[in-house]
Amino acid sequence: MSHDVQHRRLSTSSTRSADAFLRRHDVSAPRADGTEERKKSGEEVNREFEAMSESSDEDESTISHPMDKWKWWKVYAMHFLFTWNSRTYEYVSIFLVALAFPKSLTATSIRGLASTISALICSSAVGSWIDRSPSRLRTLLITICLNHGAMVLVYLCWLSWPFNSSTSIVPETPFSDLSKGFLFGLILFLDIIHDLSAIGNRLSVERDWVPVLVGPVTAEMQYSLTDVNAVMVRLDLACKLIAPSLLPLIVKTFPSQSEWIFFVAILTIVFWIVELWCATVVAKGNTQLQLPKRPFHDPTTTGIPHIDIHTLGFKPGMGSWPGKIYQIFYLNPAIRLKGYFSVSIWPASISIALLQLTVLAYSATLITYLLEIGFSLTSITIARASGAILALASTVITPAAATYMRNHYSWKVRYRGSPKVKDIGIERRVVRKIGFWGVLSQFICLIPVVLILFILSPANTSSSPHTLLTLLFFASLSLSRIGHYANLLMVQELGQVEIPLHQRSTFAGTEQSFKSACELCHWAATVLWSKPEDFRWLALGSLLVTGTSAGVFGAWVRGGNSREVAVMNGGYEGIPMGTVGILFFILIYMSDQYRFRLRGALPILCLDLRILALKYANFTFAGLTPIGGSTI
């Protein structure tokens, strides 16, 4: 059957189903006997529309050709080349900024703050744009072109940068020279475009393309979401490790700085062309990727009368500038936040965002402190490599564990007389268990790390730490990477399966905003408590944050399993807000008992927990009642 015939049949069936849906819910359409149909509530309309959309999507997935290995290789090649270009660009930018502004960290700090703040403010808007875009292919191509176009322009800016050959004693900043400051401002603007388009590309591939290419969750599926997501994360980690390592070789190969910058720019353009070709070929091989998205009735904008009234005068192209500003900077983010907390998996999303607060990872902060207390650079380098290897191993272990658990649950259902469970129910149960085991194992592995940091004194740096302590410290820290990436893969799969089709990217963009906010708090804490003797309290605060993340995720899983909503009926799970409040109040009680000992980051953390506990205890957002429970 040709693609044109399939397209016409799908369009006809979609039109008929949509017309039938409108006829069922159009109260103004009279019946044959002259009476009007009963007007259904907004919730009933939305539920029926979602059910109709999901069934139609399953039909489309059945009609579309299955993805063979060759086409999946093209998907992986497209993702690998995009990630390779981004990682190379990030490392080249760090290197060139250090050359342009020697003996000063001002420019580097400005770049980091601009990147984090722009992601914090704009990520949810980027996700909303992806959900509202009718064409999946066009959206992905736009993100690729914006991202790589910004890279090439930045490389051209660096080619025209007036690097000083003579060494200067006075540190240079972007404010030292007007021409350099203007050029750096242009580079900073292009950096923001690069970062936001990279977020858009990731959301488009993970939340829009991959679920369509994998198809409906069945026992006979050839490639599961866990397998595909694991390969994607594996490619990300490989690019993160290899791309920066090849840059010194490129720099040494070319005699001048302009030549190797020009070579990197040409390589970016070549990869750009290959990515566009791969995306086009993959889209041509899948019918659903070629079809435009169906229009939807967004449930996050219904049922709130005061928001509907306010938006009447602030439609795009109408109203005053203050009204448009109000809509862009307050009303639209408020609607997206309301939609985020209306989806039942938000506790799992918050739990993964909280992990951005921790300093217990192989980051610049931890490495600097370890050098300060006597660890050798060789041991840190080897340990960091082992952490990367175990992170890669997690992308192999997690799919294997998921496959084993799927087979185990399927066997129980078929041969042990267990209640009949759908394939989607088995998948959701597996994802929840592995995700909880991942974050819990990360918390357990970090306990010895914190204890050793309290044992070691930053004042005694004359000798290296004991060999046994060094091995235990780095072994525990590296093993925590396995659980971290297992939890990351499972939360990603939750966002691909258990969120309505038209909210997936918006939800993921809002999640990225929370991650950026936590990352900003992470760096702010390291600035406020920058002394070596304060780091142990930052480590203890990080352990408490990881424990809170595990507690929130575990309480959400336990609450959902007790009601057996998703497993038996295919619905969405929720966590009672009272459970979240109890977790926060337990931490507050602990902080009251031990507050007299705290000299570092924990007082602020406890203050933040008090504020969050009060917020969650009285949680109402635009009239929204939390799913799965009531307020405290």
Image (cartoon, grey):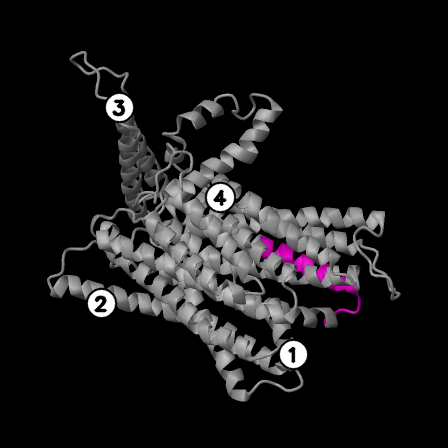
Q: What residue does disc 1 label?
A: 459
Q: Nearer the viewer, mark 1 or mark 2?
A: 1
Percent position of residue 477, x then y: 49, 74
Q: Quadrant of residue 102?
A: bottom right
Residue 458 image offset from top left, x and y in percent: 63, 77
Residue at 30% across, 29% down: 42
Q: Position of residue 518 (x, y in %)?
A: 53, 54
Q: CA distance from mark 2 to mark 4?
A: 36 Å
Upstream in sequence: badge 1 or badge 3: 3
The C terminus lies in which quarter of the figure?
top left
Mark 1 or mark 2, earlier in chain: 2
**Circle 4: element type:** helix
Q: Is residue 47 above or below residue 568?
A: above
Q: CA distance from mark 1 to mark 3?
A: 77 Å
Q: CA distance from mark 1 to mark 2?
A: 53 Å
For label 2, count other residues whose C-alpha is less than 10 Å away and answer few (under 14), some (14-19) or many (20+): few
Secondary structure under the numbered disc 3 in the rendered image: helix
**577 to the left or right of 259:** left
Residue under circle 4? 127
State which region is magenta: 253-272
| Magenta stretch prevailing secondary structure | helix
Q: In this rendering, is residue 537 above or below 566?
A: below
Measured Cα–Cα span from mark 3 to mark 4: 32 Å
Amino acid at circle 1 = Ala
The reply to whether discs 2 and 3 touch (Cβ–Cβ < 8 Å) is no
Quickly name the residue at label 2: 408
